[in-house]
Image: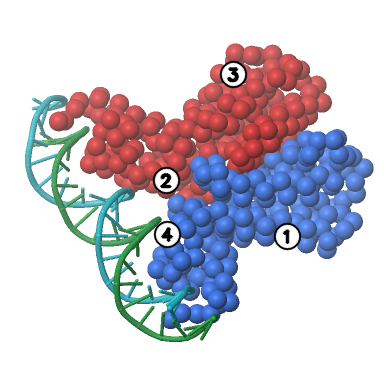
Chain colours: A blue, B red, C green, D cyan
Amino acid sequence: MRVSRDQAEKNRQTVINVASQLFREHGFDGIGLKDLMEAAGLTQGAFYKQFASKGDLATQASERALEVASHRWLAAAEANPKDPLGAVIAFYLSVGHCEERGDGCPVVALGSDAARQGADVKASFEAGIRKYLEILGPWVGESDGEEFTDKAMTTLSTMVGALVLSRAVNNKRLSKRFLQAAAKDVLARSSATGKQHGPIQ
Amino acid sequence: MRVSRDQAEKNRQTVINVASQLFREHGFDGIGLKDLMEAAGLTQGAFYKQFASKGDLATQASERALEVASHRWLAAAEANPKDPLGAVIAFYLSVGHCEERGDGCPVVALGSDAARQGADVKASFEAGIRKYLEILGPWVGESDGEEFTDKAMTTLSTMVGALVLSRAVNNKRLSKRFLQAAAKDVLARSSATGKQHGPIQ
DNA sequence: ATTATCTATAGATCTATAGATAATGC
DNA sequence: ATTATCTATAGATCTATAGATAATGC
């Protein structure tokens, strides 16, 4: 029954990855340890050798989800260095992102939940949000001496809000309009600072 | 034990009001029927004479929360008819709103949760969101023939996103900067269309 | 007679722990 | 000998239902 330390560590990583997806789909309170562990190919009993509590996993899964999310931003930017903001907006403010909760932005999928969690989970979110702002900063305007520019903060707010709203309504047309209006707005306001963007799709 | 029909209806309304607050504080999955009913001064057994299911209550509580929220927007506007947008921004993008989940905007407190719920709960949210857009529309720009203007949609997105982000981080300064940056941004962009606003507080 | 609320409970599920098992690591 | 995972279970909680109670409404 016992596996090697190497395999045990791989199993732990699998649990974190699976949880980062399933928490986004069902919320921290919407899925139990039994289902999480089974989705990772283990049984519930193995959980507490790997994690101190469900909250501990929530913290680590949030951290993982936000790391993967910001890496995706950087990958999109590298693939389109002439218009990194346009590249990120193209997938972030898309219908595909709106419909795919489990693999999408954790701030959108779990933002309301995170507000109710303890300092540990919020620390994971804060680190990820700071990373978003760092990445976004140079794309949307000049630095003003502050750690983050107001423009980076309002741009991120508009992006997150548009996704939250697009997912909270039934009407597909209304949902899409939130995304398109935000995309147009974010790109237009960034262009006003002299940046270049491709056509809005 | 039985109460009058009038009292029974009052009890039902109390349950809806209490639930609209407690769901915002704990999430739909974060509080049980026992605690909800006790907070309304009743016992769990009385629940199913008043509601078909917990989901039914979630739908009605969401509807109630959003109605109260949009009425608060209208009340603020009436109290400050020269600068209705400024009046709404003053409380919506405030630290007080950030810290008060139970009585604040339901889209912020339950937006991530609503995305996981069925069509009934989403219908409650959609109706409330449409009301927000209707109210916001005339304050932020001219109608363009569409049901809602892009500007109303991006303004609401920025407001909702700023609150979600401000609640998801531990650092109070960062939290407040999201609110202030969004307030400045929304008011400045509205002024650009020729509207008048008071000083940003 | 009807019925709003109560107490009590069924049956499922939740987090967490205990002890057994079998493979690893020394 | 150690330990990662397993099966099993404790004890609490969840949604929903059943039947008792006592006041309303006819």
Determine crowd level at label 4: few under 14, some 14-19, many 20+ residues with C-alpha closer than 10 A: some
Marks 2 and 3, the one that precedes in the sequence: 2
Chain that bears disc 2: B
> SS class of the residue under badge 3?
helix
Q: Give the left or right position of residue B45, taking residue A87 as reference.
A: left
Determine crowd level at label 3: few under 14, some 14-19, many 20+ residues with C-alpha closer than 10 A: many
Callout 3–callout 4 Cβ contact below 8 Å: no
Determine which of the numbered discs, if any, sits on residue A72 in the image. Answer: 1
Residue under numbered circle 2: B30
Determine crowd level at label 2: few under 14, some 14-19, many 20+ residues with C-alpha closer than 10 A: some
Location of the N terminus of chain B by quadrant is: top left
The quadrant where residue A192 appears: top right
Residue under numbered circle 3: B76
Callout 1–callout 3 Cβ contact below 8 Å: no
> SS class of the residue under badge 2?
loop
> SS class of the residue under badge 1?
helix
Chain that bears disc 1: A
Callout 4–callout 2 Cβ contact below 8 Å: no
Determine which of the numbered discs, if any, sits on residue A32 in the image. Answer: 4
Residue drawn at x 66%, y 25% as measured from the top left: B89
